[in-house]
């Protein structure tokens, strides 16, 4: 193999946008308490697992799955109280839905806009789709600067706007009036990403009845089904129909559909777990607030953003890892996230281990 020739071929044929990206890094969590990825920490009990396996045992994989996942969509609409006149689009995680939205509007010179710090995949996917990317900075306390945001919308005329509520990695809500101002200023599509809707009382579905340019995105990943990779886009059927044209066929496998349908029949189990996580979040927040050298921000998600003393975040992160706890190091990810760490809420035992390890790491 001629390395120089191969490098030349890659440079010639792989687009500059792709070559300029970084691979999404997922750290190895083997042997660690995993509190870095906003997952539900609870596994299914033995009886539920046996029932699920029996369901899978009667599922045939020699045929393609229902391309529209009609039965699963009906269950989701019932669980999420989605009005009958609205339609769903399912994806292999929310990432696929973000990609479909970006591809659907991708025309030279068009722009995707969001706020930062925020979900990194908005930028990554916008650049993959060769769209312009605009980010409006939050305030130093991670609040929405609504004047700056509306001003940037008017100056850039974005085709697509993503606003996560609650926001990741900050965990906060921006307020309905601010969200309304963004939707009303937007010339194109606004997507409210409600990935953490299970951990907040906020709900933007009612706004779909008021705004033609609004879509709401959700997921089952945070409620306990991260391994299934199921993203959900909710909106007027005319938007969904256009996006369906570029959705790859059979994008949600038969085992995923059957497993999700089974889980939704037992959704009360997951509702109890998420309620417990919300209670645990409040307890962890209270303990963190009492630790000298740590600042925390209120959260409506299943994680908490915190800041260490200046220059100490990486050291604290490494010391926690040495003590068997993996959280998310955010220092360096964005100017506003200097000295910041993010911890996912785990089981009571995991939360206790994290708090004790943190105190020993400072």
Image: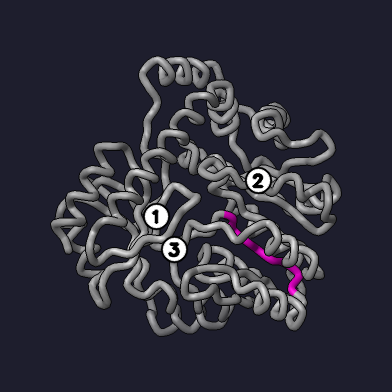
Q: Which label was assigned to residue 203? A: 2
Tell me where the magenta segment starts and ends, as one range.
158-165
Residue at 80% across, 65% down: 184
Mark 3 lies on a secondary structure that is loop
Say left or right for 42 vs 123: left
Looking at the rendering, in which quadrant would you find the N terminus?
bottom left
Q: Is residue 275 above or below residue 174?
A: above
- Please tell me which residue is depicted at 40% across the width and 84% down the height of the picture: 4
Task: Give the labeled residue for mark 3.
Answer: 24
C-alpha separation, residue under disc 2 versus residue under disc 1: 20 Å
Neighbour class for label 3 at 10 Å: few (<14), some, many (≥20)? few
One can see residue 295 in this view: yes
- Inspect the magenta stretch and tell me whether residue 86 lies in it: no
* Residue in front for this viewpoint, 119 or 107: 119
Place residue 85 in its image quadrant. Answer: top right
Question: Relative to the observer, which residue lies in front, 143 or 205?
Answer: 143
Labelled pair 2, 1 in contact (Cβ < 8 Å): no
Q: Is residue 350 left or right of residue 68?
A: left
Distance (Cα) linking label 1 and label 3: 22 Å
| Disc 1: which residue | 304
Q: For residue 206, what is the image quadrant? A: top right
| Magenta span contains residue 163 | yes
Where does residue 88 sit, x and y in percent of width and height? 73, 41
What separation in Å lies between label 2 and label 3 (alpha carbons)?
29 Å
Q: Earlier in the sequence, mark 2 or mark 1?
A: 2
* Position of 209 relative to 69 (above/below): below
Q: Residue at x 52, y 65 (%)?
A: 118
Mark 1 element type: strand
Q: Is residue 162 left or right of residue 181?
A: left
């Amino acid at each position: 193999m001629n390395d120089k020739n191969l490098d030349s071929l890659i440079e010639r044929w792989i687009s500059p946008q792709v070559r300029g990206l970084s691979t999404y890094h997922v750290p190895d969590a083997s042997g660690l308490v995993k509190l870095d990825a906003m997952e539900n920490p609870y596994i299914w009990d033995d009886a539920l697992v046996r029932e699920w396996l029996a369901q899978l045992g009667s599922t045939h994989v020699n045929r393609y799955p229902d391309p529209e996942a009609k039965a699963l969509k009906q269950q989701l609409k019932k669980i999420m109280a989605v009005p009958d006149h609205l339609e769903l689009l399912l994806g292999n995680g929310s990432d696929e839905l973000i990609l479909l939205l970006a591809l659907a509007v991708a025309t030279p010179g068009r722009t995707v806009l969001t706020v930062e710090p925020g979900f990194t995949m908005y930028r990554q996917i916008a650049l993959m789709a060769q769209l312009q990317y605009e980010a409006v900075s939050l305030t130093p306390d991670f609040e929405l600067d609504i004047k700056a945001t509306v001003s940037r919308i008017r100056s850039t005329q974005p085709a697509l706007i993503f606003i996560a509520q609650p926001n990741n990695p900050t965990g906060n809500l921006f307020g309905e009036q601010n969200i309304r101002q963004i939707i009303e200023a937007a010339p194109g599509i606004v997507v409210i990403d409600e990935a953490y809707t299970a951990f907040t009382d906020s709900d933007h579905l009612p706004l779909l009845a008021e705004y033609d340019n609004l879509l709401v995105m959700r997921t089952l990943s945070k409620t306990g089904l991260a391994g299934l990779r199921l993203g959900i886009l909710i909106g007027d059927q005319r938007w969904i129909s256009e996006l369906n044209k570029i959705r790859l066929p059979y994008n949600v496998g038969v085992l995923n559909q059957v497993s999700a349908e089974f889980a939704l029949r037992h959704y009360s189990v997951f509702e109890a777990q998420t309620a417990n996580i919300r209670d645990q979040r409040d307890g962890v927040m209270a303990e963190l607030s009492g630790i000298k050298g740590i600042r925390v921000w209120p959260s409506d998600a299943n994680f908490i953003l915190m800041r260490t003393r200046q220059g100490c975040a990486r050291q604290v992160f490494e010391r926690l890892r040495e003590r068997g706890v993996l959280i998310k190091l955010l220092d360096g990810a964005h100017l506003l996230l200097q000295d910041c760490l993010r911890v996912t809420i785990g089981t009571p035992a995991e939360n206790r281990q994290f708090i004790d390890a943190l105190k020993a790491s400072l």
